[in-house]
Amino acid sequence: MLSVAIMFVLIAAGCSSESSGSGDLKVGIVLPTKDEQRWVQDEERFEEAIGESDYSAEILFSQGSSAKEKENVNTLISKGIDVLIITPVDGDSAGGAVEAAKDEDITVISYDRLITNTDAVDYYVTFDSVAVGAAQAQYLVDHSEGTGIPLYLYAGAATDNNAFLFFEGAWNVLQPKIADGTFVIANSSEAEALQDKAELTREEMSKIVSQLTTGWDPNEAKNKAETHLTAAGDDMKGDIAILGPNDDTARAIADVFSSDSAVTSYVISGQDATKASIQYIIDDKQSMTVFKDVRTLVKDAMDMALTILDGDSPETTGSYDNGSIEVPAKQSDVISVDKDNVKAEIVDSGYYEASEFEGLE
């Protein structure tokens, strides 16, 4: 079995990382954008996790463009890769790119986000996305008191299959608490119309996600939050709960709600354990984040790639229906992190250095 490692050297242009290994290029990695800290983290963890190997690899960024993504895949195909690790910008649109890779007998590993409605995906490496949403929602339940609590719902990008899985997990936990009167939906007519349904179809969920999408964009999240608070009466303020989709959007939403004098307190979720949101948690500006240890995900992806290059079948722990086939998957666990356990989980584990934060106890 080959070592789980390939050393990367950053190309000055900043949109690509390429290994200095002596072998032919065998692994291509395509990440969605460098404009979100989450994906910069993944790039850094790939560089840390990959060290000595007989193979070379290259990382390319799609900068939020499906057209650029396809161009990146074609570039890697032309360089003779045998394994493609790809996080799609848009789950559906990525189908054409990976089908071109499959036509060249390249093994395709969907990384973190599932590529949908194509049979040209061999494996999926992921965190348990339904569990992520459930953890976010459970934190809101556990840290809200009384009944009639205004609940503000937000979602990720409607083009990202993960956004639906996150929302599914959250809805599974929140819907019973909406039904029993613990929470009152404050900002979604679509969710309100479906509040009595414990299980939503994809179409029903799409109606809610489309209404509440942030597109994973903090500016869009900020604008939506401002619109919602402007429309809300005082009965929908006071002590509130907020389903924040991820850390970047959660911080933007939190900033809006914290500036409204009629909001006396809020509990807000996030995910990704970005440095900025860890500082927000320390400062009591964000309540929690779901820690998805990218080191584990990267190691799983590279283990899988190198096992394939060795001619063996990689280990899987489940499967996901992508609308065309059941894609074999390797899942990683997630951890809820708040102020009480942030030092133990984030710093003591070596994920970040204590010196990167202020006020950490």
Image: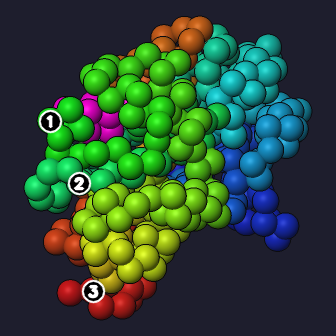
- Per the image, label 3 sits on a secondary structure element best described as loop
- Report which quarter residue 211 is drawn in: top right
* Quadrant where the image shows the N terminus: top left
Q: Image check: 201 left or right of 264?
A: right
Mark 2 near mark 3, Cβ–Cβ under 8 Å? no
x and y, in percent, of residue 180 in the image: 15, 35
Q: Image check: 251 left or right of 131?
A: right
Above or below for 84 versus 119: below
Residue highlighted by disc 2: 149
Q: Which mark is residue 180?
A: 1
Q: How is the image coloured?
A: rainbow
Q: Earlier in the sequence, mark 2 or mark 1?
A: 2
73 vs 67, nearest the viewer? 67
- Per the image, label 2 sits on a secondary structure element best described as strand
Above or below for 138 versus 240: above
x and y, in percent, of residue 213 in the image: 57, 44
Q: Earlier in the sequence, mark 2 or mark 3?
A: 2
220 vs 227, nearest the viewer? 227
Observer-side mark, 3 or 1, equals 1
Residue highlighted by disc 3: 360
Q: Which residues are magenta?
A: 168-176
* Quadrant where the image shows the C terminus: bottom left
Give the distance between the C-alpha atoms of the residues marked 2 and 1, in whole angstroms.
Answer: 11 Å
Above or below for 225 versus 167: below
